[in-house]
Image (spheres, rainbow, N blue to C red):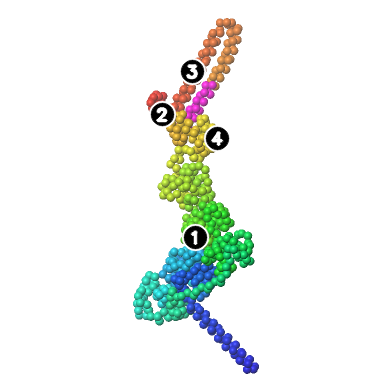
Amino acid sequence: MNRKVRGLLALIMVLTLLIPAGLGRMDSAIAASSTGPGMAAHALTAYYQNWRYVYGGSSAGAVDCSGLIYSYNGVGGQRTNMMGASPEKGSIGTLPRIHGLGLYGPGHVGVYVGGGMAVDARNSRYGVMYQSVGSYRWTNWFKIAGVQYPENGFVKIDGKTYYYEGGQYVVSVTKNIGGVDYTFGADGALQGNPPPDSAYQDVQYSSSGSVSSSSGSGTTAKASAPKAEEPKKVELKVGTTSDEVKKMKERLTELGYYDAEITTYFGEYTGEKLKLFQEAAGLEVTGIADQATLDALYAEDAPKFEPVFEVGATDPEILNVETRLKELSYFYDEPSDTYEEDTALAVSDFQAAAGLEVTGTSDGDMRAALYAEDAPVNPEAGTMKLGIKGSCVQDMKNRLVELRYLFGEVNNVFDEETEIAVKAYQTASGMEATGKLSQQDIEGLFADTAVKAPDFDCLQLGYVGSDVKVLQEKLNTLGYYEAEATAVYDEATQTAVTEFQTDVGKEPTGKATPDVISAIDSKIEINSRLEYTMKTVEKIHQLSYASNQVEEKTASRNYAVAHAADGSEGAGNRQGSDIVWLMIVGISVCGGTVTLFLVKRKPTFLKEWARKSKVLKAIRK
């Protein structure tokens, strides 16, 4: 082997040994420069310097929520799923005392900066926010991929000193560290003189060893942010005609913003649709397609059109919203593609449970939270209240009709009339009259022991039931009600009862109270007995008449044979005596029947007369 070949092989071997070592040192340096305290300081810098919210932005000065994290040395892993890339995570209720943790809420991420505070790039309206953790709908915390978190030692953030022990900073305690007593407040910040600068260089990190204060632990939150890159001066605006305009319209159509004919002309309508995209992308809303707008428009993660649905809207997506709301027990009707009042009520209830602003309208944020795996189930599932709609409401209203708290035709809407009926039921049952019925209350309503309305037995206009039908049949028997018995106390029934009350000397209220029904029964029984008596008299009369006919025929024959002319007077006398006898029998039977009935039943409409005349007492004797 010649000298040149040997020299080349030796060089290759040296490079083989040196390159991995150099890469290892490079990885170590990168890891050491990305720390939890550094992440917190970076987020605070964004807040103090008022960085802009730009959808898809990930450079200093212009970021979106995940871009705020990613702009710190490219940490975080996948921008679309930073919590998924995290090595460790937990629910927000278990949030540890660690600066620079990631925070997750449906469709959003932020940074925990300690002391119960968080920083996040919220949206184009609010920009970068600095609020308490409890002020937003955070559901989880996670350690950001690529970030090293302190285990032990002093760190400095935003000019304040903290001390880590066992992976978390200490709070509300006095500790002797290096022979010196240090007191830390409830927020973890050191109270009093800070330790010497050399103390910050001994921080131990979970996986990268010790790092100096320059690697992040001593980073202050007021460092200058790099200036964002200026966009190129490219503009498409109203009046422009070009193939680029056509291409822009095609992309806007693809994302759901544009729904008109695609041409090369940029008109007013195009400008309005472009404004919708700019607002969704967190850009300045100008209606002019500059280079920044076009870059965001053609990006792979360009935001799609997220319509806002409110009462009266019709869209296929509304069917999906209502279906999901029904799965979570906020919506009770059959899902459709129409946004109605009960949809708005269900959305409001969900927004309240999810910690969102309660608007009753369905926007992108609401739907993101709705479709999330951890979307909250309705804490008042099954509760009947004003505004909801569905077959369950109709069943409840039918039961209120049965108990006679509700009258009239029943539908499937919980309206104000239903609320009044529910309150009446609750009052009668000794419950708080809220106008709402929980699932447990509904079970009580359908129980056999459910309390009936106080006027349950006083039949009146609007009542429905078998007892109403029986009343109508009785009134029909007496000739007051001529229609078919429907079991519904309608105006015709009310009129019939009023006429009866007038005839028997009662106050004509049109309501069938128990005493009115008793009077109706009495009159029916009197009529029945009188009818029976008349039939009996008629039958006696017919028998007597037939007997007289036989006797008259016999008398005629005898008269013709034996008494030629002088027997006519006797026959006539006999016929007259038969008629008198028949009348006496009829009157006696009829009078006796009525008298016995009066003694037995004492009908209501005769009581007053009986008291005055003392006839009843005499009859009894």
Q: Which mark is residue 615?
A: none
| Picture residue at 51% right of the left edge, 57% below the top | 361
Q: Nearer the viewer, residue 125 or 66?
A: 125
Magenta stretch: dominant SS?
helix
Indicate which disc, 4 or 3, sits on the residue closer to the N terminus: 4
Q: CA distance from mark 1 to mark 2?
A: 68 Å
Residue 401 on image: x %, y %: 49, 43
Image location (x, y in percent) of residue 224: 46, 75
**What SS does tag 3 mark?**
helix
Q: Which mark is residue 584?
A: 3
Mark 2 / mark 3, whichever is N-terminal: 3
In the image, is residue 25 above or below residue 417? Answer: below
Tell me the kind of residue under disc 2: Lys
Q: Which secondary structure lies at badge 2? A: helix
Q: Real-space Cα distance between discs 2 and 3?
A: 29 Å
Marks 2 and 4, the one that precedes in the sequence: 4
Residue sitting at 52 percent across and 13 percent down? 576
* Mark nearer the viewer, 1 or 3: 1
Instruction: Compare residues 609 and 351 and report the one nearer the observer.
Output: 351
Which residue lies at the image location 47% right of the left edge and 68% below the top edge? 128
Asked whether 483 or 534 is in front, the reply is: 483
Q: Earlier in the sequence, mark 1 or mark 3?
A: 1
Q: Which residue is mark 4?
A: 484
Spatial separation of the CA atoms under disc 4 and disc 3 = 42 Å
Q: Is residue 297 visible?
A: no
